[in-house]
């Protein structure tokens, strides 16, 4: 009998509308599953006060970011609220080839680009318990101006409509419960026969 181990790691894409709590759930999930490798994105957004270059993001000027796009250094990229965000390609490809699982925490346009390139990825849509709750979360964040918040809300409403492109939907009613569900998904995906026999 063939040995039942998968050579390549899982590409886990955690996505969903702005304000749903992707960052919080992703951080809690990484604490729970410490062998998971987090892909640090590049962005042209200004760092927030607590953010560190190379830890939260690779903060780039617009010209540097454009050079990354032109050099095909990004697996996906998207413009979101006037800034660019993208996933550095080499790190993700090398980590997956080394048999390690990688998690991307990205917005919806980028997730759909990844799906075209990595149909075997695991695409998880983090959903709010209700639209009302999502509105409250966006307006309660308090780090942005009113204009930015209104923009995020309208983008979030459009993003909710793309839920049917995903493999799984996880409601973020409570962070640890959302993590439980994501852990179950990841464990089940590791047991899929086609992954185990796809050598
Ligand atoms: P924030 O500015 O709040 O850190 O992030 C704004 C949005 O960009 C969030 O929805 C976040 O998930 C998304 N994002 C972060 N990194 C990436 C990335 O590499 N690619 C894409 N497409 N979106 C990203």
Image: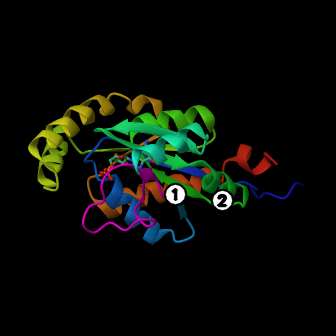
In this rendering, the answer to whether 111 lies above or below 42 is: above
Q: Residue at x 54, y 39 (%)?
A: 69
Q: Is residue 163 visible?
A: yes
Majority secondary structure of the magenta segment?
loop
Q: Secondary structure at mark 1?
A: loop
In this rendering, the answer to whether 143 lies above or below 150 is: below
Label 2 sits on residue: 95
Magenta range is 40-60
Q: Position of residue 45 (x, y in %)?
A: 32, 50
Q: Quadrant of the N terminus?
A: bottom right
Q: Residue at x 52, y 57 (%)?
A: 39
Q: Nearer the viewer, residue 107 or 26?
A: 107
Q: Residue at x 17, y 42 (%)?
A: 148
Find residue 157 and report its image quarter: top left
Q: Residue at x 26, y 53 (%)?
A: 173
Q: Mark 2 and mark 1 in contact? Answer it, CB < 8 Å.
A: yes
Residue 57 is marked as none
Q: Nearer the viewer, residue 173 or 163?
A: 163
Label 1 sits on residue: 39
């Amino acid at each position: 009998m063939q040995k039942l181990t998968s050579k390549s790691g899982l590409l886990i894409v955690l996505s969903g509308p702005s304000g749903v709590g992707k960052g919080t759930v992703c951080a809690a999930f990484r604490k729970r599953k410490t062998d998971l490798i987090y892909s640090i994105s590049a962005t042209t957004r200004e760092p927030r006060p607590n953010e560190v270059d190379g830890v939260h993001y690779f903060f780039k000027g617009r010209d540097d970011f454009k050079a990354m796009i032109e050099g095909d250094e990004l697996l996906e990229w998207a413009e979101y609220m006037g800034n660019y965000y993208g996933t550095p390609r080499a790190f993700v490809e090398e980590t997956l080839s080394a048999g390690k699982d990688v998690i991307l925490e990205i917005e919806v346009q980028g997730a759909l680009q990844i799906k075209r390139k990595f149909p075997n990825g695991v695409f998880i849509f983090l959903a709010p318990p209700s639209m009302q709750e999502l509105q409250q979360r966006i307006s309660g964040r308090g780090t942005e101006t009113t204009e930015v918040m209104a923009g995020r809300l309208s983008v979030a409403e459009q993003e909710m409509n793309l839920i049917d492109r995903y493999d799984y939907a996880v409601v973020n009613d409570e962070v640890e419960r959302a993590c439980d569900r994501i852990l179950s998904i990841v464990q089940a995906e590791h047991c899929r026969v086609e992954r185990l026999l796809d050598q």
